[in-house]
Structure formats: C-alpha cells, structure tokens
Amino acid sequence: MSEEKKRGKGMFIFICILVFIFSFVIGIASKSFIKPDWAKKYNVAWSDDIGTRYTDISYGECEANKFDLYLPKDNSNNNYGLVVYLHAGGFTAGDKSGDVEMLSWLCSKGYVACGINYTLRNETNNASVLTQANEIKQAIPIVIEKAREYGYNINEMAIAGGSAGHCLAMIYAYRDAKESPVPVKLLFGAVGPSSFYAEDWDVYGFDKDTDEARKGASDLLGVMGGVELTPEMINDGSYIEKLKPISAVMWVDENTVPSVVAYGKYDKVQPFKGSQRLLETYKKYNVDYKYFECSHSGHGLQNDNKVYKEYMEAVEEYLEKYMPVEK
C-alpha cells in the first residue's frame, strides 16, 4: 500500500473514531450532570468501609496491562464471585479509574470487583478490538490468581462494561467463556457493538450499495478487527468470517450465558441495527436475556431514565440469581 493510500485510510479511520468518541462523551456527560435519586444507589464512592483496593497490578508486558482489584471487607467466605467491569472510550480512550463508582458498588454488594485497562488504539500502534479482547482474555486468570493470593477464592465470575468495554465483555463471555479459569455466569452491559456485519453499520453509510460504502467498511472494520479487508471482500461477504473473532453475535449459541443489555434506538455511534441482530440471536438460541431498548436515546441512553433504571434493577436481579453472594 502506498504512503498516500495509507494516509488516506488513516484519516478516514481517524474521523470515524473522533465521531465515535465525541458522541460517546456527549452522551455520558448528559447522564453525569443529571442523576436521578434512584441512580445514587449504584454510584458508590469508594471508602475503606467497603473493603481494600489494590491498583495498577500488572498482567502483561504492555504499558496498559494493568488492573485494579476491589476486595470486600468481609473476607470470611469460602468463595467469592468476581465481577469484571471494562471501561468505555471508543477503543481509543478511557481508563479503569472512570468506573470507580460502579466497581465500588459491586464490591459493596460482596463481590470481588475488577477494572482492567487494555492497549488503546492510536496512530502509532496496531491495537484493535481483537488485540484488546485478547488482552482481556490474558488478564482474567491473573486477576483470579491475584485475588486468591489475597485470600479471596474465586469460583465464578460475571463480566460487563459500557460501550467499547461492553463489546469486549461480550467477546469474552461468548467467545472465550469455555477457556475461563472459572465458570462465567453472567454478562451485562450497555451500547457495545456486538455485530460487525457491514449492513448493520448504517449510521456510517456502510449499508449502501456503493463503492464508497464498501471502501469505508473495509477500512474501518478491518482496523477494528485487526485484519486486512478489501471492498471486494465486503461485496462478496467473505469479510464476515475474518471479523468473527470480534463479532460477539457470531458466538452466541444454546450455551451462551444469561445476558442483560441496553441499547439506544437513536445511537449514532454503535449501530442500533446490530443490537437488533443480537436480540434475534438471543431468541433463536433461547438465551436467558433481558434486552432494554431506550427508545428516546442515543449512545448515552440519556433520555430514558425509567428504562435505564429497569436495566440496572435487572442487573441486580440477575447477579442475585446467577451469582448470589455467599452468606
């Protein structure tokens, strides 16, 4: 590929990523400034009364390969459930420190909680959704072993996240669960892309039958998947199998773990059509799921507080059903 073509491809991808991040930040900001009373229950400030927190524990050689571990104050149980929550940021930004309130809430309920960083995509590396998902897979056994070293025996886990983090959580829960050191009992999250079928990415125009659409799809989806795609592959459908490692919906089957998810109908970042494909796949394989459609919201789910409340209540319900805390 010529330098000129590389620059053109890089600029296109850069613009798409900027749109992704900008839309995400606006949505999250709107939720942050207006928090209804019910939301305070799930936004817990960390304190030593909750337990002990260890930060920036290494799990690999890359600079970003760090995780934070939240251990509940009661260390007398024989076993503990682990809940991993992965941060958002469009695969190019974000940090585990942004989820302190969620992780603190999970720890306050008696779970060992963990936030994991992963190598973010930038102009100088080849990070992709695939490499990020593989880093998460690499981290999980080390997280579990470290918790055991501190006296917390992990015998089951759930994995979750928001946006990019939700995407990575789904990949682990649906693609990698069979290789997990402990059983994966639950997936929950919001607005994460589960499908990389080009026709689902209508918000970027990739559903159009044009050379420009096929070029855009091959460029952006190829970078996200860490594979080389061409417009011809988009046209004949051969690209789909190449993107299977990051397309969570393609791994859903009759053994898929219970899942609680939420999506915005007017999402201009993560295509809503992809979430509809996920919903139909849940139904096809009789997955125990709860799917929440925020019919007035975009990526931040900011205009459907009632639905978002129901989503969080379902998360709590499913945690108690599938990963009850040992008494």
Image: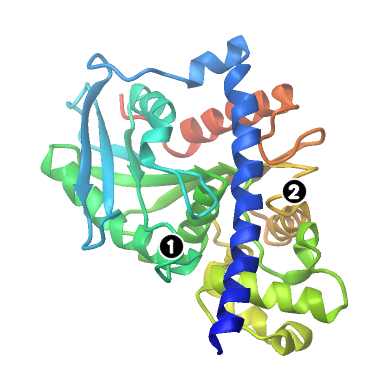
Query: Which residue bears the numbered disc 1?
Result: 133
Residue depicted at x 67% and y 78%? 218
Residue at the top extreme?
Answer: 37
Name the residue tied to disc 2: 268
Q: Residue 100, percent across and down?
A: 38, 29
Q: Quadrant of the C terminus?
A: top left
Image quadrant where residue 248 sits: bottom right
What residue sits 72% from the left and 84% below the top? 231
| Mark 1 Cα-neighbour bin, 10 Å: few <14, some 14–19, many ≥20 | many
Depth check, front residue: 253 or 140 = 140
Figure quadrant of residue 47: top left
Q: Position of residue 125 (x, y in %)?
A: 40, 68
Q: Is residue 306 visible?
A: yes
Secondary element at tag 2: loop
Q: Position of residue 63 (x, y in %)?
A: 25, 56
Residue at point 45% right, 47% down?
185
Answer few, some or many: residues within 10 Å of disc 2's Cα (few below 14, many 20 plus, some between 14 and 19).
some
Mark 2 or mark 1: whose residue is earlier in sequence: 1
